[in-house]
Image (cartoon, grey):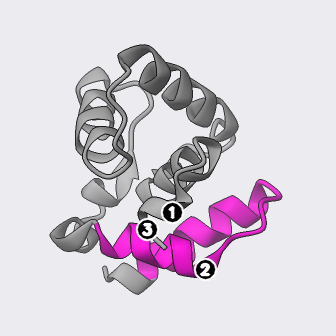
Amino acid sequence: MSAQDNIDKSKAQLTELGITVNDALLEKIVKGFGIANQSLDASLVSASDKSELDTLKKGFMTKKLGLDDDAAKDAAVTSVMEKMKPFKQKRRGAVCYLLTTDLGKESNFI
């Protein structure tokens, strides 16, 4: 699996949700995953795995988006997971894209 595969699959999910995707933003987000792009498991987010959601909050939302408010992070993750409900396999790129845009943090990447 490559970063481009993850970008394409994430964009497909976002498009299916009716979202107009900023390609440059999605590319920056996904390429920021680095080595995780090579693993199918790492390219997905399990909405039911608390430790994975905690990692998403700590690793992406705190480090990349600059959020410290735990309640705000919880609310944002809950909202995004609700939007992503139609997908059994939630692409990490799509989830992180939605977190970024929902929280108005696009300037952190572009």
Q: Residue furthest top?
A: 71
Where's residue 30, x and y in %?
39, 70
Is residue 45 positioned above or below 29 on the image? above
Whether tag 3 and tag 1 are in contact, CB under 8 A, the answer is yes
The segment highlighted magenta reads 5-32
According to the picture, the residue beneath numbered tag 3 turns out to be 109
Q: How far apart are labels 3 and 1 at the CA level?
A: 5 Å
Secondary structure mostly taken by the magenta-highlighted segment of the chain: helix
Q: Residue at left 64%, top 35%?
A: 85
> Is 37 on the left or on the right of 79, as rendered?
left
What amino acid is labelled 2 in the image?
Asp
The image quadrant that residue 3 belongs to is bottom left
Q: Residue at left 27%, top 28%?
A: 54
Q: Residue at left 39%, top 44%?
A: 45
Foreground: disc 2 or disc 3: 3
Mark 2, secondary structure of its residue? helix
